[in-house]
Amino acid sequence: MNWRDILFGAVFLFWGGILPLYLYLESVCLTLVLSMAEAGRG
């Protein structure tokens, strides 16, 4: 295991796990905010 293997592993883990999870959570929060705004106006 050299530093390049560790670096590629970290990047792969980030793109494969953290980024999709972040985007999913962001879309969920956005949906909640929009639905709350709709309910507040209605």
Image: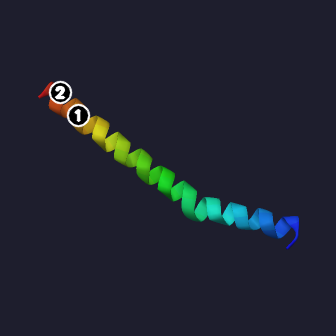
Residue 15 lies in what quarter of the image? bottom right
Q: Image quadrant for the C terminus?
A: top left
Residue 35's place in the image compared with 15, above or below, is: above
According to the picture, the residue beneath numbered tag 1 turns out to be 36
Q: Is residue 36 left or right of residue 24?
A: left
Helix, strand or loop under label 2: helix
Helix, strand or loop under label 1: helix
Where residue 16 appears, as percent x and y from the top left, is: 58, 65
Residue 20's place in the image compared with 33, above or below, is: below
Q: Is residue 33 left or right of residue 4?
A: left
Q: Image quadrant for the N terminus?
A: bottom right
At 29% from the left edge and 41% from the top edge, which residue is drawn? 32
Where residue 21 appears, as percent x and y from the top left, is: 48, 56
Residue at the right extreme, as displayed: 2
At 86% from the left edge and 64% from the top edge, which residue is drawn? 3
Give amino acid for label 2. Answer: Gly
Residue 34 lies in what quarter of the image? top left
Q: Is residue 11 left or right of residue 5?
A: left
Residue at the bottom extreme, as displayed: 1
Residue 2 lies in what quarter of the image? bottom right
Q: CA distance from mark 1 to mark 2?
A: 6 Å
Residue 32's place in the image compared with 14, above or below, is: above
Where residue 27 appears, as percent x and y from the top left, is: 39, 47
Residue at the front extreme, as displayed: 1
Label 1–label 2 contact, CB within 8 A:
yes
The disc label shown at residue 40, or none: 2
The disc label shown at residue 4, or none: none
Where residue 13 appears, as percent x and y from the top left, is: 64, 64
Residue at the top extreme, as displayed: 41
